[in-house]
Amino acid sequence: MIIMACVLLILLGGAVILPADLLPDKTFSLLPPVNFTMKEAGLAQVLLRWEPNPDQEQMNVKLGYHVKINAPQEDEFETRSTESKHVSILHQGFSASVRTIPWHNHTLRASSWVSAELKAPPGSPGTSIVNLTCTTNTVATNCTHLQPYQVSLHCTWLVGKDAPEDTQYFLYYRYGSQTEECQEYSQDTLKRKNACWFPRAFIHSKGRDWLAVRVNGSSKHTAIKPFDQLFALHAIDQVNPPVNVTARIEGTRLSIRWEKPVSAFPAHCFDYEVKIYNTRKGAFQTANMTTSEFTSTVRDISKYSVQVRAAVRSVCRAAGLWSKWSQPIDVGNDEPKPWTEWFLVVLMTTVCIVFILSLVCRRCHLWTKLFPPVPAPKSNIKDFVVTVNYEKSGSGETEIEVISYVEEPELEVLEDFVF
Ligand SMILES: *[C@@H]1O[C@H](CO)[C@@H](O)[C@H](O)[C@H]1NC(C)=O
Ligand SMILES: *[C@@H]1O[C@H](CO)[C@@H](O)[C@H](O)[C@H]1NC(C)=O
Ligand SMILES: *[C@@H]1O[C@H](CO)[C@@H](O)[C@H](O)[C@H]1NC(C)=O
Ligand SMILES: *[C@@H]1O[C@H](CO)[C@@H](O)[C@H](O)[C@H]1NC(C)=O
Ligand SMILES: *[C@@H]1O[C@H](CO)[C@@H](O)[C@H](O)[C@H]1NC(C)=O
Ligand SMILES: *[C@@H]1O[C@H](CO)[C@@H](O)[C@H](O)[C@H]1NC(C)=O
Ligand SMILES: *[C@@H]1O[C@H](CO)[C@@H](O)[C@H](O)[C@H]1NC(C)=O
């Protein structure tokens, strides 16, 4: 009974509230846009289009649209336009929704959503490429006035694990409004393309647009699934190392200078890292610089190997990669050494020479030749042994034995010298 009463009350309440709610709704309801369509407008780019609902009452309220990207990656934005270009990978399909919203008026309610989708392109699973990586590099041109720099693009990938042997892949890239197909491919052992090189790509080296790359393919046996990837230029740009690196030592001052890398970015856009290798100590010293010179005090007499690398500063572009190190520049010398070191060296050398000489003397019996043994009275037994040996072999060996007996005092001398 209580429940029924409650339900009745709620129904009554609802009946009372509903007309009150419907009234402004009828007057101020926004209707969803019509003819919402999507189409591919370039590689990895879709054009979304819709029309205002023709049944929408004219009000002196500005209307806008709320666009929601559902797949492959969620995103949303508001616009007053009736079309929008959106950059996205498309090999997994694409779907989006749009609704009419009041522009700067929160008393009106947004319309319901209308949706549309682009189907994923056909292709057997496992046939699309994997591990696509791309890098860009700037080179100077000889046409210094019109276009002083050009950008090369290099991409590599792995063949899909289920791609038939006859699969041929094709790589395209789009930057801004320019799309280009690769002309210079490399191939794997089965003659399937797995890398591509554009010596001159239509890429603006200081640009902030996405680089869109697509690798699709064909085979007699099955449909090859295409693969799209978007790259941020700052993340894949292989910066050139600094040029004209010079290093000089004057007294105890090591000064290193260099020039900015070949790049469309001006000089103030670079950070540098200097690496100094002390070959005598085997130790590195590094320093981060924003200018193109570095000075340091060196106390060691040594040879130094100097390298510098560069990166575009975050004030000019989002943080990216360091360049490779410049070719090592050698500076300084292991000589001349101060007199204390010379003294040590001379001392050590003398000791060595004396040591070697004494060894040689011992081997060649120089000692005995220079200082023949003083004949001393010998016991009869020793004389007997020597005589027996001599008679036994009658060779030179026995002579050595005799001498080695005589030599013994020399060994003692040597030992005294060494320790
Ligand atoms: C929507 O599309 C249909 C068919 O293409 C067309 O007749 C109609 O005029 C379009 N409506 C608007 C508002 O553009
Ligand atoms: C919002 O729109 C309603 C209906 O047109 C209008 O009465 C109201 O003044 C508007 N409010 C603002 C803040 O513009
Ligand atoms: C390819 O990429 C996957 C994951 O992205 C990784 O696990 C795999 O090691 C990569 N293969 C090669 C050969 O680099
Ligand atoms: C200068 O550029 C032209 C074409 O751009 C090329 O044919 C020529 O070899 C280049 N010269 C030098 C010295 O690089
Ligand atoms: C590959 O993609 C490009 C660019 O979207 C397209 O022009 C070409 O027809 C496609 N080729 C195949 C074999 O699907
Ligand atoms: C590097 O040095 C050479 C010779 O000193 C000079 O011709 C060249 O212009 C320098 N490079 C740069 C980028 O300044
Ligand atoms: C230089 O900067 C790098 C990162 O940019 C940092 O890892 C390194 O420690 C810095 N070196 C010095 C000497 O400050």
Image (cartoon, rainbow, N blue to C red):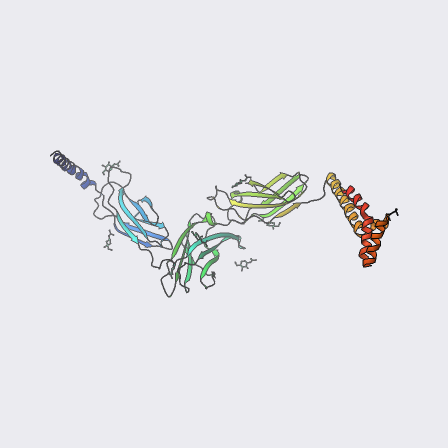
The C terminus appears in which quarter of the rendering?
top right
Q: Position of residue 299 (x, y in %)?
A: 66, 38
Which quadrant of the view contains residue 347? top right
Left or right: 251 in relation to 128: right
Number of marks in picture: 0
Q: Position of residue 272 (x, y in %)?
A: 55, 43
As drawn, the residue found furthest toward the left would be 1
Would you say residue 395 is visible in this rendering?
no
Q: Position of residue 139 (x, y in %)?
A: 52, 53
As drawn, the residue found furthest toward the bottom would be 220
Left or right: 55 in relation to 171: left
Quarter of the rendered image showing ligand 4: bottom right
Q: Position of residue 14 (x, y in %)?
A: 15, 37
The structure residue drawn at horizontal position 37% and vertical position 53%, both measured from the top left corner, is 44
The structure residue drawn at horizontal position 74% and vertical position 38%, both measured from the top left corner, is 340
The N terminus appears in which quarter of the rendering?
top left
Left or right: 190 in relation to 379: left
Q: Using the image as rendered, state which of residue 144 and residue 339 is in the foreground.
A: 339
Which quadrant of the view contains residue 412? top right
Would you say residue 277 is visible in this rendering?
yes
The structure residue drawn at horizontal position 31% and vertical position 46%, both measured from the top left corner, is 68
Which quadrant of the view contains residue 400? bottom right
